[in-house]
Image (cartoon, grey):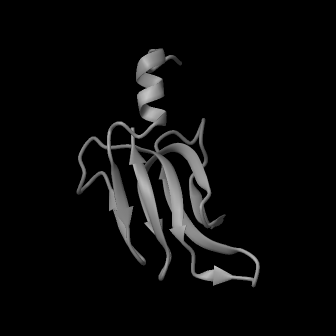
Amino acid sequence: MDKYNANEALNVQLGQAGYDIIGSGGTINQTSNPGVTWVAITVLTGSTDDGMNSTGSITATSVDTDVWDSLSTVAVPTGTTIYGRWSVVTTASSDIAIAYRG
């Protein structure tokens, strides 16, 4: 269960392995980024707005569904960060997110 030591885990949490911006309706995956897993996703711009809050839709494929569920068009409030381990991350049309590598 211990994949990282304490320092490595902190680096992963802080996005020390880098990040990728996912533009409107964009997808990042391990096919174009071999060996990369994304550990956190923050919605920067959401296209759905109820007048008080905006949300972006995220679809993501979990690398281990026994621990983390895959996400299927989940509404995430703008500015919110979600954590997990994903091999593919997609934003909906007009939504923008940043995905941190880990």
68 or 78: nearer the viewer = 78
Q: How many marks?
A: 0
Residue positioned 47% across, 25% down in the render: 9
Q: Is residue 90 left or right of residue 72?
A: left
Residue positioned 36% across, 36% down in the render: 16
Q: Is residue 80 left or right of residue 15?
A: right
The quarter of the picture where residue 17 lies is: top left
Give the answer, above or below, for where 57 lies relative to 98: below
Residue positioned 58% across, 52% down in the render: 81
Residue positioned 57% across, 75% down in the render: 46
Q: Position of residue 54 (x, y in %)?
A: 66, 75
Q: Position of residue 47 (x, y in %)?
A: 57, 81
Q: Quadrant of the C terminus?
A: top left
Q: Is residue 75 left or right of residue 29?
A: right
Q: Position of residue 101 (x, y in %)?
A: 37, 44
Give the answer, above or below, for where 30 lies relative to 39: below
Give the answer, above or below, for where 1 lies relative to 30: above
Q: Position of residue 74 (x, y in %)?
A: 63, 65
